[in-house]
């Protein structure tokens, strides 16, 4: 089967299963992932390996831009304390937690390799979080926090990953240097995104040419990401800043009919990209499974399950700590914490349970170098990739299937009260 035929076949399945998911009242990513696994095991289908560069350049910019554009800048600012806590401190805390579990459980796992695995799985995924929670009737506050966290935490995870891989290859880790690089990556990404967003004001001079304006807006996220990466700053933060900035000034620059036309086009693009991503995630399982000795599959699945549970527990602990910290700060009036920024039990539990991993974790894992600088194979590369894929599947399918039940239970209990 030719590659282009496979792509068309996958797109057809994606559209059909998305329609079926609506009828079954299931999150459509779950069906697409299962379909991807089934397709991957089909003997006539060629092995499809994710290219990390394609994921980061073709898939990530439009998805991040769309999510950032649709988030309320005012609400984002209101919940910036919680978003920052989950997107930065929780990422590094999760990295350490996963590393500790991996080091003490997995045979042959060194501390540097354990931190590589921890960094790969430390961040939640914007695509997964938004797609799984869509249609569940979550509060605006919960959606804002989940989307805001997922938009920013990729940058934190990529920094942690970069230094973990450097440690494996023998480069010394220096805390102040890592901290400085993190600040420069985020600050540089913000600056690039802000500057690129200013280009949108040029569109005021061509208001009558709708096709050119929409085409420009479609191209802008990709260009912004490339410019940021060219300057060695965070392309993720640049695209998120671009989306937030354009959303903030859109009423001044774009007429209403233009925004509606642009939204219709973006909705189709995002639907197609989302569907492809979840099928690609499923397709990776048979591929990475073939690289693991048969007798090791069971133990490594158990390790992945334990890491998933530990990751969920760490997230719950940090979210509920944030809930208490916000309440304490609000009551003591020591910080500028508004009442709208506070979390209740319902918000906290849903946010805790919505920490799915996704395509970014897979792209980072598969992007692991195959050899070290001296030419020797990267230690436990196949094992790290397999565990990463398994954890992504466990979070997407396990949490994705149970989250609607939890939301329904909490909603019914709230109505009773």
Image (tube, rainbow, N blue to C red):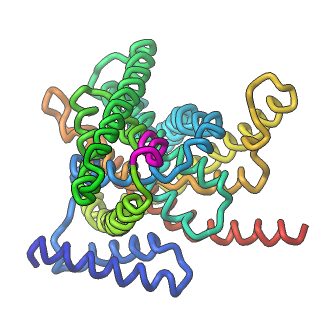
In the image, is residue 21 above or below residue 134?
Answer: below
Quarter of the image with the N terminus is bottom left
Residue, x 34% and y 25% (percent of image)? 167
Q: Between 151 and 253, which is closer to the camera in this rendering?
A: 253
Q: Residue at x 27, y 45 (%)?
A: 220
Residue 343 against residue 328 in the figure, above or below = below
Who is closer to the viewer here, 222 or 254?
254
Residue found at the very far right of the displayed protein: 417
Q: Position of residue 185 (x, y in %)?
A: 37, 26
Indicate left or right for 240 with 208 as reference. Answer: right
Q: Does residue 250 show up magenta in the picture?
A: yes
Could you say which is closer to the camera, residue 162 or residue 225?
225
- The span shown in magenta is 245-253
The image quadrant of residue 296 is bottom left
| Image location of residue 230, percent across then percent down | 21, 30
Look at the image and say whether residue 292 sits in the magenta stretch: no
**Quadrant for the C terminus in the image:** bottom right
């Amino acid at each position: 089967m030719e590659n282009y035929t496979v792509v068309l076949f996958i797109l057809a399945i994606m559209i059909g299963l998305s329609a079926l998911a609506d009828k079954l009242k299931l999150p459509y990513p779950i069906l697409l992932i299962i379909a991807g696994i089934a397709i991957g095991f089909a003997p006539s289908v060629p092995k499809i390996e994710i290219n990390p560069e394609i994921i980061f350049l073709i898939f990530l910019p439009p998805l991040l831009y769309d999510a950032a554009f649709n988030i309320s800048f005012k609400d984002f600012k209101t919940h910036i304390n919680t978003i920052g806590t989950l997107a930065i401190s929780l990422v590094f805390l999760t990295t350490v937690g996963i590393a500790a579990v991996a080091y003490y459980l997995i045979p042959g796992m060194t501390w540097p390799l354990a931190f590589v695995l921890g960094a790969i799985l430390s961040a939640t995924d914007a695509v997964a979080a938004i797609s799984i929670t869509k249609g569940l009737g979550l509060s605006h506050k919960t959606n804002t926090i989940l989307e805001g966290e997922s938009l920013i935490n990729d940058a934190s995870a990529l920094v942690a990953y970069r230094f973990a891989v450097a440690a494996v290859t023998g480069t010394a880790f220096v805390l102040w240097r890592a901290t400085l690089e993190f600040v420069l990556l985020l600050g540089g990404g913000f600056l690039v995104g802000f500057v690129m967003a200013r280009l949108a004001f040029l569109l005021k001079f061509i208001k009558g040419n709708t096709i050119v304006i929409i085409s420009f807006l479609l191209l802008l996220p990709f260009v912004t990401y490339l410019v940021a990466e060219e300057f060695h700053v965070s392309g993720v933060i640049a695209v998120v800043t671009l989306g937030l900035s354009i959303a903030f000034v859109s009423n001044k620059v774009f007429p209403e009919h233009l925004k509606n036309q642009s939204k219709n086009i973006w909705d189709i693009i995002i639907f197609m990209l989302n569907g492809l991503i979840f099928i690609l995630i499923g397709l990776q399982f048979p591929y990475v499974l073939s690289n693991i000795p048969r007798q090791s599959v069971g133990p490594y699945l158990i390790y992945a399950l334990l890491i998933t549970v530990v990751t969920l527990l760490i997230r719950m602990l940090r979210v509920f700590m944030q809930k208490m910290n916000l309440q304490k700060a609000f009551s003591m009036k020591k910080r500028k914490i508004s009442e709208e920024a506070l979390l209740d039990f319902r918000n906290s539990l849903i946010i805790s349970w919505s920490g799915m991993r996704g395509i970014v974790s897979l792209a980072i894992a598969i992007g692991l170098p195959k050899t070290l600088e001296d030419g020797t194979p990267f230690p436990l590369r196949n094992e790290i990739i397999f565990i990463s894929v398994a954890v992504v599947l466990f979070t997407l399918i396990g949490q994705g299937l149970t989250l609607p039940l939890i939301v329904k239970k909490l909603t019914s209990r709230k109505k009773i009260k």
